[in-house]
Image (tube, rainbow, N blue to C red):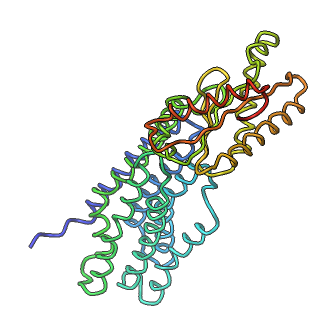
Amino acid sequence: MLDLPDIQTLRLCSMLASLAFFGVFACLWVGRRDESYFLHWGAGSLLYTFVILGFNVSDHSPVEDGLLYALLSTSTLSVLTGVRRFDGQAPVPPWLIGLILLSGLFYAVPAQIFGSDSAPARIGGTCANLLAMAVSGGLLFFGHRGGEGPGRRIAGSALLGFIPGFLAAIAAEAYGSADVNMAALIPMLCDPLLLPVLNLGLLAMPGERAQARLREAALRDPLTGAWNRAGLAALAPRLLRPGNAVIVLDVDHFKTINDQHGHGVGDRILTLLVESARTVLHSPGSEIARLGGDEFVMVLPERSHAEASGLADELRHALRSRLRRMPDLPPCTISLGIAAIEAGDRDFAQAIERADAALYRAKAQGRDRAA
């Protein structure tokens, strides 16, 4: 039978690893002070180091060790507070403070009744840390935000990976020998594997977000924020379906506006047009893309010609209303052409061509209308 590892050696290894990750997070925060989630994650690693040290020097009174277990849960929950800050949320909701206080009581109450070094006290402390791991890991793993890569789920899975070790520790304390502190030994055995996975998952998250933003920026028109042609092509798997409506639109006499008022005014009108379009695109999944110049296309899921025509009129009136409130911009109108995506369309080109032909009919009929 293999000899059990020395708990003090395992604690030293966990302390050194946590100090190393604290140094990484601290350096990243010093270089990017506005990204305070690094400070949360670094503080959690540093706090974990001091908690382990505290268990080594503690006199193991119920109050002192209860405080250490509360701080241990705090170090775990700092992963969650950092992620909440990363997501732009308040990092410390009130329920989280209650969870920390509960963690201390999980140990302190049985320790007061049965003794600080008793199996019930160890089980209570282990349950407290298990609860913090389950809450943090569950929210990270199952509350995953799409489009930013797997870093968040990797961190969440690492936290959840501690749970089998805690359950084994509880079972060992309940049914095994009390000669060895299994509540300390088994979780410490998990640290060398899961702490690096946890922290590397957290470190991956900012890079994944930056990559996602760069990918989206490459698919967006920098002036208006509408999708560009590449972005429209990327939307094809979701929007290129028979029955969806396509509206092609442009600004009437846009060249004259640019010539008489300047390209800056023309740019403002295009931006205002896209803003107006977004106010009338009520149905989920509707999108607008800039094809080039002053020409745009809107794709509307599951809209009939009559519904698309109503939305086109709504957009014309919305733009006119906004322009009335901006006297420094010249009055202008838009013309629109409506078509439907058909079963044989391999990409948006065919539907856009049909809508474009309708757009020219609208212009031939006097502009400022949809056809």
In the picture, residue 294 is in which quadrant? top right
Residue at image position (33%, 64%) is 161
How many numbered marks does the figure carry?
A: 0
Vertically, is 345 above or below 37? above
Q: Residue at x 33, y 76 (%)?
A: 167
Q: Nearer the viewer, residue 56 or 36?
A: 36
Q: Position of residue 304 (x, y in %)?
A: 64, 49
Q: Nearer the viewer, residue 314 or 50?
A: 314
- Please tell me which residue lies in front, 46 or 205: 205
Q: Position of residue 76 (x, y in %)?
A: 46, 61
Instruction: Identify which residue is drawn at 46% across, 62% down.
Output: 142
Spot the residue most to the left. Answer: 1
- Residue shown at the point (43%, 80%) measured from the top left: 124
Which image quarter holds the C terminus? top right
Q: Quadrant of the N terminus?
A: bottom left
Extreme-top residue of the structure: 259
Q: Is residue 282 left or right of residue 302?
A: right
Image position, residue 295 (x, y; %): 65, 25
Q: Give residue 118's quadrant in the image.
A: bottom left
Residue 207, position as x, y percentages in the image: 45, 38
